[in-house]
Image: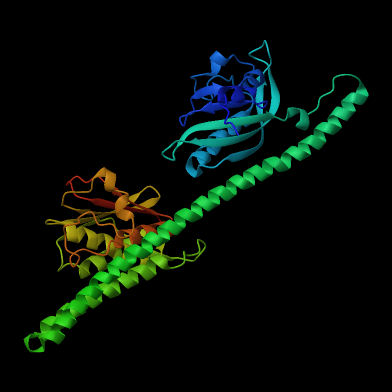
Amino acid sequence: MMRQNVDYAAVFAAIPSPCLVMTPDLIIVAVNQAYVDACGLQREELLGRYLFEPFPRNPADPDEIRALRKLEASLCRVRATQQSDVMAPHKTAMPVSGSADVFEERYWSAINTPVLGLDGEVTLFLHLVEDVTAYLTRRQQAGPRAGELDAHEQAMEAERYAPAKELQELHEQLREAKTHMEQLFQQQRQFAADASHELRTPIAGLRLQVEAAQLHPDGVDLPDLLDHVKGDLDRLENIINDLLLLARPKPDTGRILEEVDLTELIKTQAARWADRCNLRLDLDPAVTVNAAPGEIARLFVNLLDNARRHATHMVEIRLRRAGEHAELAVTDDCNGIASADRERVFRNFVRLDTARSRDRGGAGLGLAIARDIASDHHGSLHVDDSATGGACFVFRVPLAR
């Protein structure tokens, strides 16, 4: 059997359905004659142009903008999955021949297909469309009977179009849900890996010390060994408590909270830390919020512990009424946190100071827990600029009514 040379350009030109080829950045590089005929533009008006530039838009039709967004979303899926994506019929408004200001409704069905290069990456998009207007809308122009029939046909065709549109929207919702679930699964896997790493460190320390004591029992300083073992056990207990707190079910937003005097709570907690760091308090009196006192105390202690570990000389605690909110700021006098890292510090197991020892540093969960507590109380927690140049953590929560 003789192998024939195929003129692929001629094949592309002969495809009866409108078809165009575009680059990954949506620049049109080829169109067949059927596409030129369908869109009513010259080939020169299409080639080298961004996909959405050549086509006049009907500003009175919001459906057109939604259709363009759905097309962009479809192409993004094709790029991500490297698989064809079929779009349900969608409505567009095309300019009537000879008039740039008069539009007619057209319905299109499209298939977007990737063209892969030798490296396996998407190098081109093939956009194949079908004009299904005749199937979805048939308009007859003459006679009252024809008008009645036209209205009946349009109603029936609209009924056929509506389920297709609903199916497409449901399909897109399912795609979004699948993407969200994949992200949650990846986050769960990362969390499990990070948690395992954090738990393994003190366990390894315990094992090393116990095995050394078994090998050289006569050289064991028992009080020193017990101190180290107790320290590692304390660290394990703290990590496990933090993990349990992060894994707890989210509280019901309708739960009943207590009126808490935030000023007195901060004074009480700060007094327990007086021998650990130099504190400066600047508190408005009787700042009252609706809260779970134990959780708010945990949030404050986590912020205070973080500031203490980084402070050079002083930790400043300021509490103010700010409109309808209470605003608590905990500031250290160290080097501060770069803008690029101010959100990252609230992720699980994140430590910016990688050089500090794990004994001195926490597990990297304290700030994540503090933000969770803030969110549970309809509040916020963020890092702000500090006049001293250090890190300033600001907690805002609604005042009690």
Q: Residue furthest top?
A: 98
Question: Is residue 13 visible from the viewing direction of this image?
Answer: yes
Point 45% across, 35% down: residue: 117
Residue 297, how many percent across, how many down?
A: 32, 66
82 in relation to 43, above or below: below
Point 45% across, 53% down: residue: 183
329 in relation to 101, above or below: below
In-image side of 77 versus 14 (left or right): left
Image-quadrant location for residue 39: top right
181 in relation to 29, above or below: below
Image-quadrant location for residue 376: bottom left
Q: Residue furthest front?
A: 1
Closer to us: 300 or 206: 206
Point 23% across, 48% down: residue: 337
Tell me which colouring the rendered structure shows. Answer: rainbow
Residue 125, how many percent across, how many down?
A: 52, 32
Question: Is residue 261 visible from the viewing direction of this image?
Answer: no
Closer to us: 384 or 238: 238
Q: How many marks?
A: 0
Q: Quadrant of the N terminus?
A: top right
Residue 154, how many percent across, how many down?
A: 81, 32
Q: Quadrant of the C terminus?
A: bottom left
Residue 395, how many percent across, how many down?
A: 33, 54
Closer to us: 94 or 35: 35
In-image side of 309 versus 134 (left or right): left
145 in relation to 283, above or below: above
In-image side of 335 versus 170 (left or right): left
